[in-house]
Image (tube, helix red, strand yellow):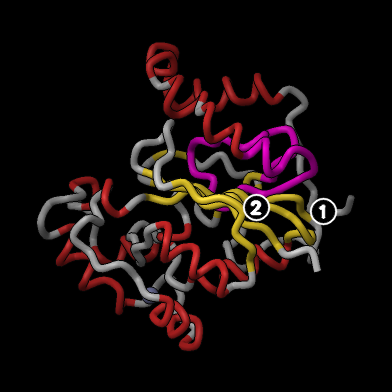
Amino acid sequence: MKGPAYDFPRWPAWELFRTHFRRYGLKAIYKSFRYTIRRPFSRALIARHAPRGRGVEVGVGSQSIAPLGRTYLSDAHAGHAGQTSLARLRADAWKLPFESGSLAFVLSEHVLEHIANPLRALREWHRVLEPGGALLLFLPHPARCFDRNRERTTLAHVIEDERAGVDDADPTHLPEWLERVVGPGLAPQYADLAPEAMLSTGSIHYHVWGPEQMVELLEHAGFEIRETHETVPDRNDSFAVVARRKVS
Ligand SMILES: [Zn+2]
């Protein structure tokens, strides 16, 4: 299969240990084993919908639940909040270096909410998937994260973002974020970050979706929904939606 030059690890289990050891150290690696590494529910979900073939994890960050031996790890940023990204491909989520219809799956965990123009990204993920290919999305549940005081984003809003061609530097999403999240101290990790830096690093949650809004958005982008999970048993702050590119 053609694709960008990429050095897939020959020993995925060793790669998993090595990359997480670098981040956590030996003691912490044991403590974080279940929630950030083992993730039995989430890995099983991926294995069920993407049992074979190569895929991409978009916005991988510093940890991954992807099958590393056949997943291109991609990220637009070299790091997030001081943690080095595992990515070996640097690419924007809406401009991936893959041929159309060439991937068996697209995986993304806590990323779409950091993209100012989510429809542009979803159309790109749809493009690179083969017919029947799986889209596996893990997203923060607004009821269980610092977005709890925000309105959920409507489909009309996201359609307007696409029509206007907004990108991550777009400042119109910032005031509501500052008022509802940073101001009340719900996300202290952002308190020391200048607002411009929040945008340039894509670290704000531009939008807020629960499972229902995400299903509506994915269907609008042409995906067929396979499964939704209001809760992710091995990641408490999340919900999950699995969709696929339609076969015909
Ligand atoms: Zn928006």
Image region (quadrant) for ligand 1: bottom left
Depth order, front residue of 244/34: 244
Q: Amino acid at mark 1?
A: Gly
Residue at mark 2 to residue at mark 1: CA–CA distance? 14 Å
State the residue position of label 2.
106
Residue 3: mark: 1
> Which residue occupies 42% across, 66% down?
213
> Which residue occupies 55% across, 66% down?
218
> Which residue occupies 30% across, 74% down?
173
- In this view, the residue farthest toward the bottom is 164
Q: Residue 68 in the image: x percent, y percent?
A: 67, 34
Query: 10 Å neighbourhood of mark 1: few (<14), some, or many (≥20)?
Result: few
Secondary structure found at label 1 = loop
Q: Disc 1, ligand 1: is the CB inside 8 Å?
A: no
Q: Residue 11 in the image: x percent, y percent?
A: 73, 22
Depth order, front residue of 46/230: 230
User: In the rendered view, does 6 fall on the left or right side of 2?
Assistant: left
Q: Residue 6 in the image: x percent, y percent?
A: 76, 44
Q: How many marks?
A: 2
Depth order, front residue of 161/168: 161
Q: Is residue 157 above or below residue 189?
A: below
Q: Residue 141 in the image: x percent, y percent?
A: 34, 51
The answer to which image quadrant residue 43 occupies is top right
The segment highlighted magenta reads: 46-72
The answer to which image quadrant residue 206 occupies is bottom left
Return the disc, 2 or 1, that comes first in the chain's sequence: 1
Does 221 appear in magenta?
Answer: no
Does 70 appear in magenta?
Answer: yes
